[in-house]
Amino acid sequence: MTRTLLIALSLLAAAPARAADIWVSPTGSDRNPGTQAQPLATPNAALRQARDLRRLHDASVADGVHIWLKGGEYRLTEPWFFRPEDAGTAASPTVVAAAPGEQPVLSGGMSVTGWHKATGKIAGLPAAAQGQVWVAVAPQWAGRAINFRQLWVNGRKATRARTPNHDNLPRLLIWDTDKRETTVPAAALGGIKQPGQLEMVLHQMWAVNMLRVKTLTVQGDKARVTFQEPESRIQFEHPWPRPIINGKNGSSAFYLTNAIELLDQPGEWFYDAPRGQVYYWPRSGENLATAQVVAPALETVVRVAGTLDQPISHVQFKGLTFAYTTWLRPSEQGHVPLQAGMYLLDGYSLAKPGTPDKAGLENQAWIGRPPAGVEVQNAHHTRFERCQFRHMGATALDYQSGTHDDVISGCIVRDAAVNGVQLGKFSDESVETHLPYNPKDEREICINELLENNLVTDCGNEDWGAVGIAAGFVRGVTIRHNEVAQVPYTGISLGWGWTKTANAMRDNRVQANYIHHYAQHTYDVAGVYTLSAQPGTVITENRVDEIGRAPYVHDPDHWFYLYLDEGSSNITVQDNWCPAEKFLANANGPGNVWKNNGPMVSEAIKQAAGLEAGYQDLPRP
């Protein structure tokens, strides 16, 4: 008997410990123990429990901690923040996963309820909309009505009231940099008499600007328009991209948005912020009495962040949906992007050209970075697997800096106002954006990241200069077998800085991606686009097809399948399929190799591009 007991004890000691399981449900309680039968109610309570288990070296975490989220919506009032204390190890990861067969949603939105059909005549509302719109009081946050730029009805994005409602956009007549005003056709105003909350969305080459209107002065068949600060100063001073007057395809196009006078068709909405009232004209089949209407309140729903000296590691997210985020900077300071969603803080032409990096550079600029619904910084060995990023007011997912050996796999990014995925440093706010990034502490650099088998679609649906995947100064990054579609500008943008000078970038790989229906709104564009020196970088076996044909682009011929732009150096572009050999190498540095790109590339390479067999179940656009 003693011998039998000793054998049993030795077997028990040798058996692997089970991972700690913590369960969460929207119908649970934070007073519960967090078991499957008695789940917690909030993700944050679950993370605290996991943190305590690690802090106390509990034996149950030997094989990791699993936080299981049951199906339903988790309305967050602050970002779910993962710190270094929440880190796992290779043997004992922290895994946040959907409960088997269920679909949890981490939401930064608030419900808009109490809808009723508007009665009586509403001042400013077009005649066609009178008697058609519904009205609700905006949600309250900390005792006041929230502000927001997006509205979703039953998961479908509504259109902020605008004119025109089609692609036949009006054009600028005059652009006066001295007076800081523009002149437009008076007929383009759509009946607006006072600027109120009005914004102009202005198309400029490879970007669009969101400019808050300050004054409108109608003189006959023309109207003079000025803009609020600080965007007025930035807009009239910065040289690239700039508005075009009487160019190859006419003058720059624009549309107007965010006025009740423009709410003239089903699916449009207007938020009267001073009065805290939301107006919406339902689409066919929508019942506002029962519809789920959501306005975003949080910029970020999940943050994973350590420090360079104390990073966070081995945190995994599986099967989760991140949804409904906001970004209010355009409503508060306007939005004047330089490129790929990175917005100008300052920018101007130089009276005497020349900068520390480039003797002939004729301008300087400083940029900010749009926020993301999910942000990761100073982390390694993290993973997003089979997750969804939907209904984002800015970017969906951002690996900012100080990250390495992370994986984004099998995810869906759909409906983002700005970029789908951002990766790596672009330029810090205090650093002139044309300078090469080459930090003394290389731990800052995003290194050895893997993006594979993701579906990225309907990104940049507000900022038309945004891209599907935006990678800045990155090293050893692999972007492979993704499908990028329905984007307004470039599909995959790799690099930053417009410089031939050696910098942090090298050894990146863009391979076997399928990019199609890109450049839906802007040109000077490509399916795959690069900037600056990045030795050892390879762009290979991609399939690029189906360019957009917007009627208002500045130069209808200036689009490409593959495009190495300023400073691009030591890059190999080989065996990429596209229907024609339409490429551009602009102001490149040395060492680039172009080989076997175009319709002659094998059918096998063409068909193999995009999602691999195990990911064909991802729903296409």
Image: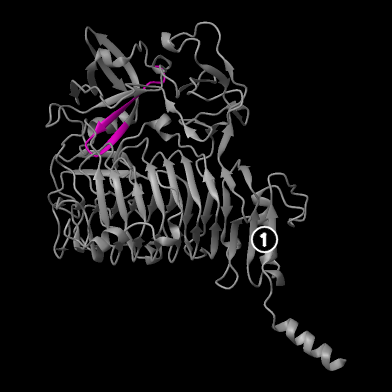
Q: Amino acid at mark 1?
A: Ala
- Specify whether 17 is left or right of 179: right
For the point 22% across and 57% down, which residue is it? 577
- Specify whether 556 is left or right of 388: left
For the point 49% across and 14% down, which residue is it? 132
Spot occupied by residue 304 in the image (x, y as percentages of width and height): 52, 55
Pointer 1 local density, CA inside 10 Å: few below 14, some 14–19, many at least 20? many
Say if 132 sits above or below 314 in the image.
above
Q: Is residue 405 visible?
A: yes
Which colour style is shown? one colour
Spot occupied by residue 405 in the image (x, y as percentages of width and height): 43, 66
| Picture quadrant of residue 216 | top left
For the point 52% across and 59% down, which residue is it? 306
Name the chief secondary structure element in magenta.
strand
Spot occupied by residue 328 in the image (x, y as percentages of width and height): 45, 34
Q: Give the camera-side residue of 12 and 345.
A: 12
Badge 1 marks a residue whose secondary structure is helix
Q: Residue furthest bottom?
A: 3
**Residue named by callout 1:** 50
Spot occupied by residue 40 in the image (x, y as percentages of width and height): 72, 51
Q: Residue furthest right?
A: 1
| Picture quadrant of residue 83 | bottom right
Q: Give the camera-side residue of 546 and 436.
A: 546
What segment is highlighted magenta in the picture?
Answer: 196-209
Q: Give the camera-side residue of 365 and 109.
A: 109
